[in-house]
Every structure is written in structure tokens, then in C-alpha cells.
Amino acid sequence: EMYITEKIRDELAEERSKMGNTGTAKQSTTHIQNQCKAHHHINKFLQTDFVALIQQDGSAEVMVPSLIHTLFGIPPAKRDVPVLLRDNANRFGNVMLYGIERDLVLMDLMVFIMWDLVFQDVFISALLTYIISHGLVAVRDKF
């Protein structure tokens, strides 16, 4: 997890304000383009520039999550430097399948169809597909 300083938060809020009101149905092409540019700028900053800035300055503080943060999700006290919390339990890896979700869904569909052709029973096909899918996730967790 990443907690940013008020200065960085204000810069991101300024970029977000360039997006304007996102709730209107009729928007001009330039307004939509400005929204896309601002969104891309914020994402690029958080994904690459922010990490590069931290590596360059060494200004971030890397902390192990406290018990209170783990139980209740309370952020650490505000600091003058960004705070990064370690993910020792690999929770991010447990949530995401590293960008291969679509491939796994297609594989599940093909496995389901294969078992449906073999047994011609939807329940057995779904059960075997579920077992195989969770088996692959369990194997992935081991490595």
C-alpha cells in the first residue's frame, strides 16, 4: 500500500480537477480528451514517476504494517515523506492473477465444454471445471 503526502495529494487533485465534471451526459470531444490526458498523467505519475522519484531521493519510508493497520486498515500517521507498506503476505498476488484472467476464463470455458461433451451433464462439467480451476490456483500459490 502507498500513502502519499499532502503536497503530492494536492498535485493529483489539481490534475483531477482538469478532468472536470465526469457526470454529464453531453461532453465535448476536447473535454473528453482532456479527461483522458489527465487520467493518463495521474496513472503514469503513480506507476512510474512516483516510484522513480522515491528511488532517486530515497525519501519514502518503507514500513511493516502494524497489527492495527492489518486488522482495521487504519493508515499510518501523516508524515512529510510518502509511506509504503510492505506486502509480506503477498496479498496483491493472491487477488490478481498477474494479467492472465482473460486467458484463464477462456481456459475454464474450454474445459467446461470438453467435460460437457464427454459426460453430457452440466453439473458434472461445472464441478470438474471448478476443481481444475481451483487446482491451478493452488499450484500457482505454491510457486
Image (cartoon, rainbow, N blue to C red):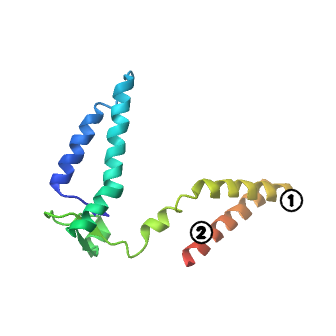
Residue 63 is situated, as x and y percent measured from the top left of the image, at 25, 74
Q: Is residue 53 left or right of residue 115?
A: left
Q: Using residue 11 as the reference point, say whether residue 30 is left or right of it.
A: right
How far across and how far down the image is residue 3, in percent?
Answer: 25, 61
Residue 98 visible somewhere in the drawing: yes
Which residue is situated farthest in the front direction here?
56
Q: CA distance from mark 1 to mark 2?
A: 24 Å
Give the quarter of the figure containing the C terminus: bottom right
Callout 2: helix, strand or loop? Answer: helix
Give me the residue at 15% from left, 53% from top. 7
Q: Residue at x 29, y 30 (%)?
A: 21
Circle number at residue 137: 2
Q: Quadrant of the N terminus?
A: bottom left
Residue on which the image places disc 1 = 118
Amino acid bearing label 2: Val
The crowd level at tag 1 (other Cα within 10 Å; few <14, some 14-19, many 20+) is few
Q: Position of residue 36 (x, y in %)?
A: 38, 37
Give the class, few, some or many, for how many residues have Cα within 10 Å of label 2's Cα (few <14, many ≥20): few
Using residue 95 as the reference point, say whether residue 77 is left or right of it.
left
- Identify the residue shown where x is 71% and y is 61%: 129
Tag 1's secondary structure?
helix
Mark 1: amino acid: Val
